[in-house]
């Protein structure tokens, strides 16, 4: 009856929000109702938001508008967790996510705020363990091992960046559960647990992939070259654009020899093609415009006679 998503990395707050959005668009079951989110900002503040109905579409507002993305401070937060399910849960919704500046965030699925027989709720118990120095994995494993029949799965993410997710033995036996974990470059990482949402495995994977893609750093644009109609096209061992001192294309080299003769609608400047100036590698192209090539000459690029193409550093 819930999905839990947590992430650490650049724009983790935006990442988990967009992951929830994607889930709501394709999934059936216990979704699009209540949602609660907690983030730890770059300067260590704890920020929260919640809604009882509408999920991501009502979680944040801007003036009179709903359906907006998180405010900048939330979106840019490097530590973030959320939980969402059907509508109208018992308040306060903040109890579903345990969080503390300098320590971390613990969310999950099923009932992470469920009370144990001998102490605080599962999520609070995990957060307390992290406050005492346990890693997210140690904290979650300890709590779940002590309560194997608990109706809970937990995702813990530390303020220092570690993340771990797992279900109790009881929840793991359910036929409707799914989990996904993704790790990207640097410290970017995301974990997803869900149940009662269909198709379970596909939705969990989608949520994790969307979150990780959102946290992926965009390639740095090093410069822009110009490509004009009339530029020669020749075959060669690898894709390349040779440019002059003004970064204007002198020659386009394609590894697809068929494109050097005849008439073709193609990506003649291929994605990732080398950009070379006097033999020196400047970088690699970041886009591949649609082109018309005829008899070894560029006729047009994106139906234009001249365009710019961004490239990243070498």
Image: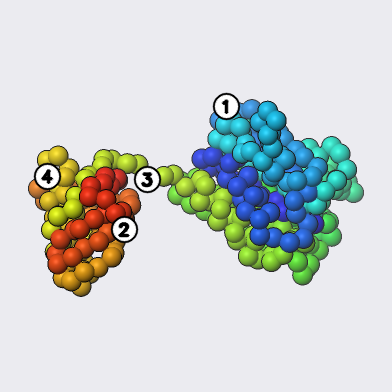
Q: Secondary structure at mark 2?
A: loop
Q: Secondary structure at mark 3?
A: loop
Of marks 3 and 2, the one in the foreground: 2
Q: Which residue is mark 1?
A: 43
Q: Nearer the viewer, mark 1 or mark 4?
A: 4
The CA distance from mark 3 to mark 1 is 26 Å
Q: Give the residue pinned by disc 2.
A: 290
Within 10 Å of disc 3 (Cα), the crowding (few <14, some 14-19, many 20+) is few
Marks 4 & 2, CB-CB < 8 Å contact: no
Label 4 neighbourhood size at 10 Å, few (<14), some (14-19), many (20+)? few
Give the residue at x 18% y 65%.
Answer: 294
| Residue 236, x across and y down, in percent | 15, 66
User: How many C-alpha atoms fall within 10 Å of the one at disc 2: few (<14), some, or many (≥20)?
Assistant: some
Q: Secondary structure at mark 4?
A: loop
Q: Seen from this angle, which residue lies furthest right? A: 117
Q: Nearer the viewer, mark 4 or mark 2?
A: 2
The residue where tag 3 is placed is: 219
Instruction: Write down the residue under mark 4.
Output: 244
Label 1, label 4: how many angstroms apart (C-alpha)? 46 Å
């Amino acid at each position: 009856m819930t999905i839990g998503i947590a992430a650490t990395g650049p724009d983790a707050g935006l990442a988990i929000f967009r992951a929830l959005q994607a889930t709501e668009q394709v999934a059936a079951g216990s979704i699009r109702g209540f949602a609660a989110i907690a983030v730890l900002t770059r300067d260590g503040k704890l920020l929260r938001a919640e809604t009882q109905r509408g999920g991501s579409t009502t979680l944040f507002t801007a003036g009179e508008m709903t359906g907006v993305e998180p405010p900048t401070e939330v979106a840019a937060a490097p530590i973030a967790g959320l939980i969402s399910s059907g509508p109208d849960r018992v308040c306060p919704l903040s109890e579903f996510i345990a969080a503390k500046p300098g320590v971390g965030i613990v969310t999950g699925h099923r009932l992470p705020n469920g009370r144990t027989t001998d102490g605080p709720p599962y999520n609070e118990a995990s957060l307390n363990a992290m406050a005492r120095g346990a890693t997210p994995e140690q904290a979650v494993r300890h709590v779940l091992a002590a309560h194997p029949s608990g109706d809970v799965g937990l995702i813990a993410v530390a303020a220092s960046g570690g993340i771990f997710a797992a279900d109790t033995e009881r929840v793991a036996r359910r036929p409707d559960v799914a989990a996904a974990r993704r790790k990207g470059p640097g410290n970017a990482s995301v974990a997803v647990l869900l149940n009662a949402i269909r198709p379970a495995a596909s939705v969990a994977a989608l949520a994790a992939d969307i979150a990780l893609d959102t946290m992926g750093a965009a390639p740095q644009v090093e410069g822009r070259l110009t490509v004009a109609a009339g530029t020669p096209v020749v075959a060669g061992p690898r894709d390349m654009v040779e440019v002059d001192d003004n970064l204007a294309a002198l020659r386009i080299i394609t590894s697809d020899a068929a494109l050097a003769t005849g008439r073709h609608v193609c990506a003649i400047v291929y994605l990732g093609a080398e950009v070379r100036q006097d033999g020196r590698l400047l970088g690699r192209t970041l886009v591949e415009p649609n082109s018309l090539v005829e008899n070894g000459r560029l006729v047009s690029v994106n139906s234009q006679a001249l365009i710019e193409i961004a490239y990243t550093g070498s």
